[in-house]
Image (tube, grey):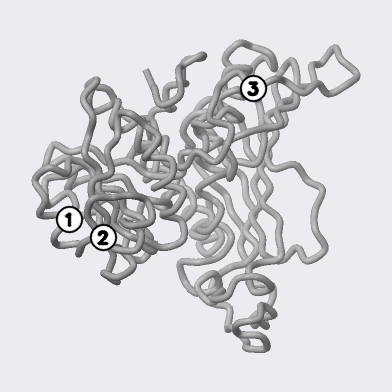
Amino acid sequence: MKKMNVGIIGCGNISSIYFENLKTFQAVHVSACADLDLDRAKAKAEQFGIAKGCTVAELLADPEIELVVNLTIPAAHARVCLDILEAGKHAYVEKPLAVTREEGRAILAKAKEKGLLVGSAPDTFLGGGIQTCIKLIEDGWIGTPVAATAFMMGRGHEHWHPDPEFYYAKGGGPMYDMGPYYLTALVAMLGPIKRVAGVAKISYPERTITSSKKFGQTIAVETPTHVAGVLDFHNGAIGTMITSFDVFGGSRLPCIEIYGSQGTLSVPDPNTFGGPVLLKRHDSQDWKEIPLSHGYAANSRGIGVLDMVYALNGGRKNRASGDLGFHVLEAMHAFHDSSEQDRYYVMTSTCERPAPLQQNLPYGVMD
């Protein structure tokens, strides 16, 4: 298989796991990395044995680079993706695809115009945990899926994050922060969403930072911190979802459960790649932990990039696609829009449910 030259833009904290994992994939060669801070790009290049740490302009001008991984901050996702596509290179971006729906549409339109591929994190649904759940659903272990629940319940970031202000500014909040993981997992298991009903509120208009760097400083909250709602899926299933930064005492709710006509499936944390996966059939008194049917159970961020390389070489659609990323982006906005407008939000986008991975593939092989 042809090895593809890949560049990385954005050398912040999350980039390290991408450098580590992409270097282990035989089909990928990371040949350059770039950052607004050139010294940081050069430091990452030296740390991970990358040939070139350079400016963004230099990376985009390199004719040998075919695909660029965009690991910039969310506010820059759209602008950098458009620059990547304009340079004639395929683009894979960290979650979310963009901040606004208009930006997301612009990315997809530019890719179509240029005949290029777009990919978007999260790729956690390609891990062994959720792929096992997909196989159990497809093999009929819970019968026909009729409902789902998804809960991301926490106390927010001000008690641990050194710079938590973003999470409470417009464009932040629990839905935009963690929603991509949960919604992507639900779509991967159940298919696309038809409509959304949401309720959202700011429970506490001010937050006090207790992490050491800015201890005692306050944050004015500009975005809902508790978002709850219902999703109607095209396959007929009904989902209930809550994302919250207002649960200070902790929660014992599951991350995700899928309810079927013959049983219930407890899905692992969609922000991880592994298990445990638990199944309780209608004719059983006990939950049973199911061994993972697929690999990539460790932190495998970057397998979405690997799958994109295989898609480009094989002439197929990539699983962590731009269409999936946009559908999830629209669904996140739908919760807020529904709450503000006091009505159902009917989705304007759709996507194909990503093709499940085959079992027993060697490491670094996606087909």
334 vs 329, nearest the viewer: 329
Which percent across, then down, holds residue 251?
Answer: 80, 53
Q: What residue type is labelled 3?
A: Leu
Q: How many labels does the image show?
A: 3
The residue depicted at 60 percent of the width and 22 percent of the height is 132
**Res. 289 visible in picture:** yes
Which percent across, then down, holds residue 80?
Answer: 25, 59
Q: Name the disc covering residue 34, or none.
A: 2
Q: Mark 3 points at which residue?
A: 292
Front label number (2 vs 3): 2
Disc 3 packing (10 Å; few <14; some 14–19; many ≥20): many
The N terminus: image quadrant: top left
The residue depicted at 54 percent of the width and 36 percent of the height is 185
Q: Which of marks 3 and 1 is nearer the N terminus?
A: 1
The C terminus: image quadrant: top left
Disc 1 packing (10 Å; few <14; some 14–19; many ≥20): many
Q: Name the residue under label 1.
A: 59
